[in-house]
Amino acid sequence: MGKLAPDALREVISCIKKTVEVIVPPKPGFDAGAHKISDDICIVIATDPCLGVPKEWFGWFLIHYAASDVAVFGAQPRFCTINLLGAPGTRKERFKAVMKQACAAADDVGMSIITGHTGTYGGILDLIGTCTAYGFIHKEQIITPGGAQPGDYLICTKPVGLETVVNFALTRQTLAEKLFGRERTLCLAEQISMQTCVEEALLMAKLGGVSAMHDATEGGLVAALNEIAEASHVGFQLDYEWLPLPLELQKLATHFDLSRAEVLSASSTGTLLAGVSPSRKDRIIDSLAKRGFDAKIVGVLTESKQRLIQYAGEELQFPRQAADPYAKILAEAT
């Protein structure tokens, strides 16, 4: 369930023809692409599905999933298209509620909704949305997961497992209150709007010195860091003690008997990972702090292709395959 494995995806997209206008084509680990519209200006494009999220936030997620992917490439999201596909019998009011949410979210991001498609179809069990977002950028300013440089520091802008912890508190309130306490559970549920990285991605792109960025969505840190390393032909060294691991994620790990690899693979939508040059790291961290982001240095990129993590004084191999516990946690919590 979830994204195709990299090898499977390469096989699926192998029939796509290469053209000179497309400067960032489809490839594993790249959540957006780009094509030229003039000698210097490009359009960054990202498309994302939206399903299985709280109905009160459906339209918000619909916008922010795609907008975040555009922003992570360094471009301001400007336009988008939306598809809303409902099960037979889906009422007009459901579509209206989602579009009202989407319009408000698009306004906040600075995007205009320009077209789309809405309908009900057999075979669909619940509402499915897709959003394709667009942004303009100079071709020399595009930031991709494939640009990471040896010696750059790895910065993490938000907690590991953010999406997992927040959505657990929101949708599994009874068990969450037992594990976290009532006050903390209510506080976590209010952090649902942290599951976007538009603001911090655009800020970091503007400040400069950023070689690569990646939203730690499905598969969390494990998927995102391996995709950066693979695309950039670099390695990395992390320190487990430096990772922003929330207490609640550790409590979930104990309750659901999660391995360390599963903890590091926990879905973390909104948590941005970035490779940052040594000369800019302090300025970037300070600027993020002024916007309310408690960014942390979690490691360094290396010329060696090894992917390592320090744990309790021991140097270990970083997991190569994500084992995201998101579905396991929410399924077992019912």
Image (cartoon, grey):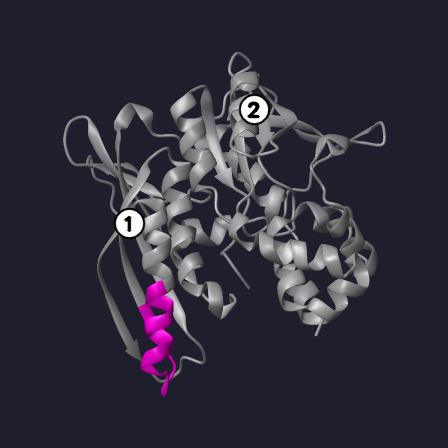
Q: CA distance from mark 1 to mark 2?
A: 39 Å
Q: Nearer the viewer, residue 145 or 108?
A: 108
Q: Amino acid at mark 1?
A: Ile
List x then y, in percent, for residue 266: 65, 51
From this view, report whether residue 122 is shown above or below residue 247.
below
List x then y, in percent, for residue 92: 31, 80
Q: Earlier in the sequence, mark 1 or mark 2?
A: 1
> Could you tell me if residue 99 is visible in this image?
yes
Query: Is 330 placed left or right of 52 in the picture?
Result: right
Q: Quadrant of the N terminus?
A: bottom right
Q: Amino acid at mark 2?
A: Ile
Crowd tier of the residue under label 1, counting other residues whose Cα lies within 10 Å: few below 14, some 14–19, many 20 or above:
few
Identified at 81% across, 65% down, the residue is: 178
Q: Quadrant of residue 308?
A: top right
From this view, report whether residue 232 is shown above or below residue 320.
above
Give, as a single range, the part of the protein colored magenta: 84-100
List x then y, in percent, for residue 165: 66, 55
Q: Which residue is mark 2?
A: 285
Q: Is residue 244 magenta?
A: no
Identified at 51% across, 16% down, the residue is: 280
Q: Which residue is mark 1?
A: 16
Helix, strand or loop for disc 2: helix
Query: Is 126 placed left or right of 25 in the picture?
Result: right
Which label belongs to residue 240?
Answer: none
